[in-house]
Amino acid sequence: MKSIIGILSSVIKPLNLLLTGLAYLLGISIAKYLGLTIDSTASVFGGTYAILVMAASYSLDMYFSPSYRIPPIIDTPKEREGFRRSTLYLSIVLLAIATVFIFLMLVSGFLNFYSISIISLYLLIALIYAVPPIRLVDRGFGELLMAFLISGFSVLLAFTLQAMDFHRLVTYLDFPVVFISLACLLALDFPSYAVDQKFGHQTLLVRLTWEHAIPIHNLLLIISYLMFAVAPLFGIPFRLIWPTLLTLPMAIYQVVMLRNIMLGLKPNWRILTINATALMGIVIYLLMFTFWVR
């Protein structure tokens, strides 16, 4: 049972799906804060669609991935071939169900130009992330696309399904959240850097090299927190933003860990992974919770 759960986790990345769900709830929370009446049916349909497409993208990524990324518990050629077929069938089923939810949103009148645009971009990015011949995950742009899918377009999709429009509050907050997500996804590449480099898997970290990736990671975090700090200058009340600054020690700690790697100190990959994942999730959660209760 544990092995099945482990294999499934390696395919659909449930933590990333959870982060996507949190970001989606952030979009709904902003809509509520702005005084919009929340349509629960539209929220459920849109959120389910986003998570299904994300899971399908990860499943397709595993289908087209090199053999070394297949879970080691699947060791015989026959099992590996069966595993690949299973990930393909899973992605087809997930995308078919996602299509059903698009149809339900369409016939329910939840879609307009803005929401259709976001839904289409969401699906397009999810496919070019994983599917050849483009397959940007193998070209060093996978983390960039995932940062936008997890914490950028998910927020926009949730909001446009409620507001049928964009709002400057959503577009402003999207940038620091996406930058933090990209920095954390970049940090999460470090534990597998040696293996990815050995087998020629072009993650963003491999493409940049760690010497360039660490300053970029630090700059992304600096820009994110600066955008939070100066939000009042753009008409966003500080009472909505200050909770995110509580995560600043976690960001500083992550910078210190990567600096230690640059200095040649032995890293603790487990702590780095936990910190990077938690930083993404807590920033999104604090924003979501603050907007919901205001």
Image (tube, rainbow, N blue to C red):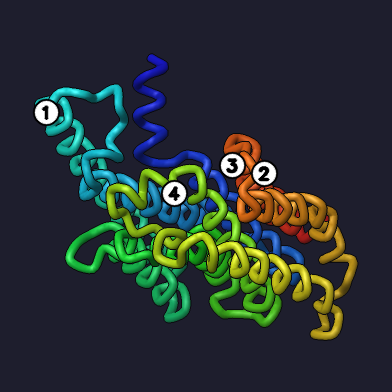
How many numbered discs sit on the rendered protein? Answer: 4
How far is the residue under mark 2 from the one under mark 4?
18 Å
Tell me the number on the disc at residue 273: 3
Left or right for 95, reference 237: left
Q: Residue type at mark 3: give it.
A: Thr
User: Of callouts 2 and 4, which one flags the residue occurring earlier in the amino acid sequence?
Assistant: 4
Mark 4 vs mark 1, foreground winner is 4
Q: Residue type at mark 2: give it.
A: Asn
Task: Residue at 46%, 63% (x, y): give it.
Answer: 209
State the residue lying farthest toward the front.
Answer: 264
Q: Residue type at mark 4: give it.
A: Tyr
User: Of callouts 1 and 3, which one flags the residue occurring earlier in the amino acid sequence?
Assistant: 1
How far is the residue under mark 3 from the one under mark 4?
13 Å
User: Of callouts 4 and 1, which one flags the residue occurring earlier in the amino acid sequence?
Assistant: 1
At mark 1, the secondary structure is helix
The location of residue 124, given as percent across then percent down, is 32, 68
The location of residue 30, given as percent across then percent down, is 70, 66
Mark 3 vs mark 4, foreground winner is 4
The location of residue 270, given as percent across then percent down, is 59, 35
How far is the residue under mark 1 from the one under mark 3?
31 Å
The location of residue 205, given as percent across then percent down, is 46, 59
